[in-house]
Amino acid sequence: MNEQKIPYKIYLSEEEMPRNWYNVRADMKVKPAPLVNPGTLQPMTAADLAPVFCDELIAQELDNDTREVPIPEEILGFYKMYRPSPLVRAYCLEEKLQTPAHIYYKFEGNNTSGSHKLNSAIAQAYYAKKQGLKGVTTETGAGQWGTALSMACAYLGLDCKVYMVKVSYEQKPFRREVMRTYGASVTPSPSMETAVGRKILAEHPGTTGSLGCAISEAVEVATSNPGYRYVLGSVLNQVLLHQSVIGLETKIALDKYGVIPDIIIGCAGGGSNLGGLISPFMGEKLRGERDYRIIAVEPASCPSFTRGKFAYDFCDTGMICPLAKMYTLGAGFIPSPNHAGGLRFHGMSPVLSQLYHDGYMEAVAVEQTAVFEAAEFFARTEGILPAPESSHAIKVAIDEAKKCKETGEAKNIVFGLTGTGYFDLVAYEQFNNGAMTDHIPTDEELAVGLAALPPQPKA
């Protein structure tokens, strides 16, 4: 094949868009462990989850067997505003690196929210509206999820209450203002608005917050206000289901040109982007149809995969949510506030955790100064200012391409570019001024959080 036949950007037509989400759990030999009640240590039922989540989303959360889930026409119609998203052949990056590798990235930043989060936000808002609810509550870290959900709620006429990690609320005022422009209320977390927020502040005065803190507040508000439910932008099974459109479109585009990836790379915080990107490829791997090397990239400051423990833990710092079995640093772990990305969650998706535990993928942790060096190199080469989260994947993609230069192997490398970094310019400013530092937690620091894991259900 003449590789020049592959265009710089591969666009799909509307007719080629996926009509179903893909549920990778259907092909997993070992299913992710169920959510359990922290009091009884028994699996949560649909009735148990009903006060927190929308009914249809609960059904998706608990469904381990349905491989393909039809995407409602209303959601498909919304997707067509910004999907299909392009798959880009990084010719400029390849030339700059002088690598024989062929590098592709799936770009999810071509919508106003600036990231992939809108794929699940519109789905969750749709099911809330269909149920007749008044509004939804949520948390957000760097702000991409809060922005996406604000947009979706504005489109469907739902109220939206966002609890934003305090350090991000202060570092990213413009992201906050986009949410408010779309009608959402935005509260820095932890706050004095909720009982759990007041408790966290009393125990940790001056804390800069975490996603775990914000989750606790959002869940408390949802369960104490009639007509509201809580929605989450990552971690949960339902979110990975909705985000599978990323991987499905990627695979359709590659298949059109007969390209088979050797390496697939995604940044990993809670797992929505990585899980969505790898889903159809992981499905082939699980079914024994094809093998891929899949790499999760996480921040060294919050290394749940690479230094965490595979155990049941609370998803939230306030410890009011169900327990999930995942790679975790402990619900009480508060990541360093100097980390510029939105990958600050103490745990990882139960689906991805099980796949990692079973050896279907690998993980690497990278320091943020190296991440921003890669981000700057990519921006100057490919012309896109990448989000700090995505830049974790960029860093490892560049590393793998350099290895190909050393070995002479022309491997196909695919990574996820989750969005743009235009609301992250404070972080870029710190990097450009030489003021950015790296914080890698010590074993002693991590031991504190892991020592506080809750009682574990019997196997």
Image: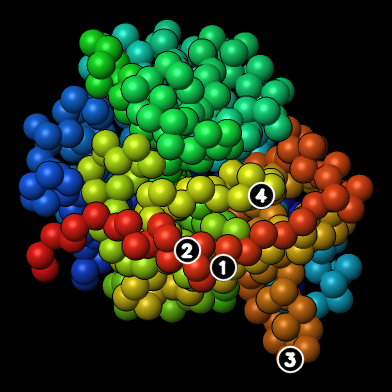
Label 2 – label 4 distance at C-alpha? 17 Å
* N-terminal label among 3 and 2: 3
* Label 4 packing within 10 angstroms: few (<14), some (14-19), many (20+): many
Q: Nearer the viewer, residue 15 or 441?
A: 441
Q: Earlier in the sequence, mark 1 or mark 3?
A: 3
Picture residue at 37% right of the left edge, 62% below the top:
450
Q: Which residue is mark 3?
A: 407
Is tag 2's residue or tag 4's residue first in the polypeptide sequence?
4
Q: Residues within 10 Å of mark 1 (few under 14, many from 20)?
A: few
Find the distance from the CA under tag 4 to the CA under tag 3: 34 Å
Q: Nearer the viewer, residue 383 or 386?
A: 386
**Three-letter amino acid code at the position of disc 3:** Thr
The residue singled out by tag 4 in the image is: 339
Label 4: element kind: loop
Q: How many marks?
A: 4
Q: Quadrant of residue 372 in the image?
A: bottom right
Q: Which residue is mark 1?
A: 442
Tag 2 residue? 446
Of callouts 1 and 4, the N-terminal one:
4
Residue type at mark 2?
Leu
Residue 336 vs residue 153, the one in the foreground:
336
Q: Residue at x 73, y 47 (%)?
A: 386
Q: Position of residue 3 (x, y in %)?
A: 73, 70
* Proximity of marks 3 and 2: CB atoms separated by less than 8 Å: no
Residue 112 placed where, x, y %? Answer: 64, 26
Which residue is located at x 40 percent, y 11 percent?
A: 158
Mark 4 against mark 3, which lies toward the viewer? Answer: 4
CA gap between label 1 and label 4 equals 16 Å
- Label for residue 257? none
